[in-house]
Amino acid sequence: MANRPFVSRAPTRPRIHSSEKYDAAFQQIAADAAAFSDYVLAYSQQDTKVVAFYENNLFRPEMKTALEAWKATRPLQNPGAPRTPFEMKEYRNANLEEAQALERDATKYTESADKAIQNADRYVLLTVLFASVLFFAGISTKFNTLKIKYSLLAGGVVLFFSAVVVLLFQPFA
């Protein structure tokens, strides 16, 4: 097995499950819509046998609840009634609700990971700055001219204090 870099799967797992739930939800919604379009035709023609078949065999329980609420609005007689049960608050899809919850979790994980990455990047920058201080201090000993030595040391001192100031404003774990 090849060496792979460590990648936290916490943000991706809920997003993957969210996508799966969205897919299932949209398949159910499409099936509900297809069955409803045939149901409406039978309902408007008052074909009670087909209407009963759809209500008893084809609609999911969540769809049945919305359908009953929709029928209670008397859609054929009431022009103010919702055009479909999909427009009603009673129409729910558990997969869609779960997908949305998982998406919110994934977003929280992603925001947390982004913050951690920013902190890590700042600490890497600090490491480079402090290493540069050591470089300037070390290289200054190789020159014979005092002006160059002091210039390099001054650059190292400025980098050191800059790095310390940045470090003071970093979050601590």
Image (cartoon, rainbow, N blue to C red):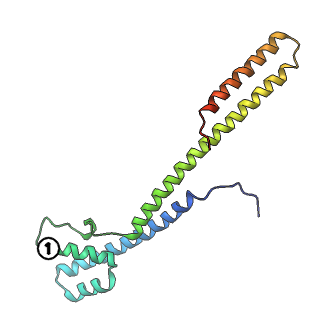
Is residue 123 shown left or right of residue 81? Answer: right
Q: Residue furthest left?
A: 77
Q: Residues within 10 Å of mark 1 (few under 14, many from 20)?
A: few
Query: What residue do we see at 73% from left, 21% from top?
Result: 157
Q: Residue furthest bottom?
A: 49
Across and down, in percent, residue 91 comes to 29, 69
Query: What residue do we see at 67% from left, 35% from top?
Result: 125
Of residue 101 and residue 16, the one placed in the foreground of this image is 101
Of residue 131 and residue 42, the one placed in the foreground of this image is 131
Q: Can the viewer see residue 73 in this picture? A: yes
Of residue 78 and residue 167, the one placed in the foreground of this image is 167
Q: Which residue is mark 1?
A: 76
Across and down, in percent, residue 38 comes to 27, 78
Query: What residue do we see at 81% from left, 23% from top?
Result: 137
Is residue 28 shown left or right of residue 82? Answer: right
Across and down, in percent, residue 133 comes to 76, 26
Q: Is residue 44 above or below residue 152?
A: below
Q: Can the viewer see residue 75 in this picture? A: no
What kind of element bears circle 1? Answer: loop
Q: Is residue 54 above or below residue 140?
A: below
Query: What residue do we see at 28% from left, 68% from top?
Result: 86
Q: Name the quadrant containing residue 83.
A: bottom left
Hey, what amino acid is under mark 1?
Leu
The quadrant in which the N terminus is found is bottom right
The quadrant in which the C terminus is found is top right
